[in-house]
Image (spheres, rainbow, N blue to C red):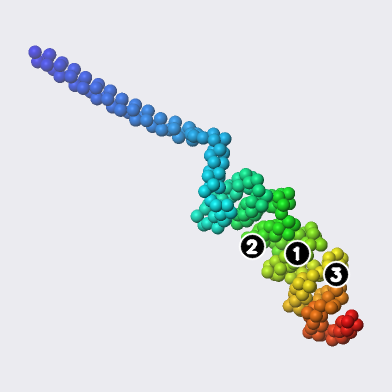
Amino acid sequence: MFILKLIAFFTGKLEKDIMEKTLIAKSRRRVINKVQFYLKLEKKPSLVFFSFLEMLALFATSVVILYSFFPKGELEKYVLGSREVNIDLSIKYLYALSKASQNQEERKTYKSILIEKLITAGRFNQALYEIENLEKEGFTKEEIAKFKLSVAKRMYLQGKLSKEELYNVFEDLYKSDKRNVEIIDFLLSESISLGLSDFYRYLVYDLVKDRIISLDKKLFFKLLDLSLANLDYATGEKLIDAFGRKFIGDREAEIKMIKYLLMTGKPQKASQLVNMILEGR
């Protein structure tokens, strides 16, 4: 009887041990399966919820909704001026708006803002690409020159363009349309603000040499003032010799030239100019 109880005891313990080991094994398998499941998930690529065409359609719909919500002319102001708008997002909207608009003036507005945004974001190559295609969009040569110089200035200020390279940009823009007084005046003003004093000397030399434009009074005065400010009296004298006769009869210009010659130590030349003026009258 005792032996039977002993056998039953050990048999029960054995069964208990087997059950415990079985439970532990199952538990371990469940843990391993879970780990393997999550590892597989990590290896799988991100799930794509929308196709490219669906995303494009969604983006276009967003643009149309924005366009309809904003009054005419206000969307570009918001995109350009609001600090809340992410610059990358605004650039995408402006690309879409400039392509979607059927009105040339609206497209010009969107393109202008787009280029300004690209320059601000430091995307100079993209900005230059857009600028190269502006002429067919109805932009003037003056507007295109201003955009090109805007890119060059920003690159120069960020140290991505040397002073010599910036000077070359000025020279190239001038050579691209030498007869355009507006571009010359603009380039001259910008060169002064950037401290490129050599550019106005080059400009005077070229204007005097070729005389391909009819210098207006405003530009003539500006060049005289620059030569005076830089103590470059010879350059101012060349200007008066080349273009002074054109302004005889204009009281303001006559006084300006006589004063310049007297201030720069050329009394004899000033006297000759006075005689010329009197003879003209």
Instruction: Specify the amino acid type for callout 2.
Output: Leu
Report the residue marked by disc 1: 182
Tell me if residue 224 can be seen: yes
Viewer-side label of 1, 2: 1
**Neighbour tally class for label 2: few under 14, some 14-19, many 20 plus, Cα within 10 Å:** few
Question: Counting residues from the N terminus, which is met first, the one under dot 1 or under dot 2?
Answer: 2
Q: Which element carries disc 3, helix, strand or loop? A: helix
Q: Which element carries disc 2, helix, strand or loop? A: helix
Compared to 208, does 120 lie above or below?
above
Question: Counting residues from the N terminus, which is met first, the one under dot 3 or under dot 2?
Answer: 2
Compared to 142, does 16 lie above or below?
above
Quadrant hosting residue 256: bottom right
What residue sits 63% from the left and 60% below the top?
A: 158
Q: Which element carries disc 1, helix, strand or loop? A: helix
What residue sits 56% from the left and 38% below the top?
A: 57
Viewer-side label of 1, 3: 1
Report the residue marked by disc 2: 157
Taking the view exactly as shown, the residue that stands out farthest to the left is: 1
Q: Position of residue 7 (x, y in %)?
A: 15, 16
| Tag count | 3
Report the residue marked by disc 3: 208
Q: Which mark is residue 214?
A: none
Inter-mark Cα distance, 3 to 2: 32 Å
Instruction: Specify the amino acid type for callout 1.
Output: Glu
Question: Counting residues from the N terminus, which is met first, the one under dot 1 or under dot 3?
Answer: 1
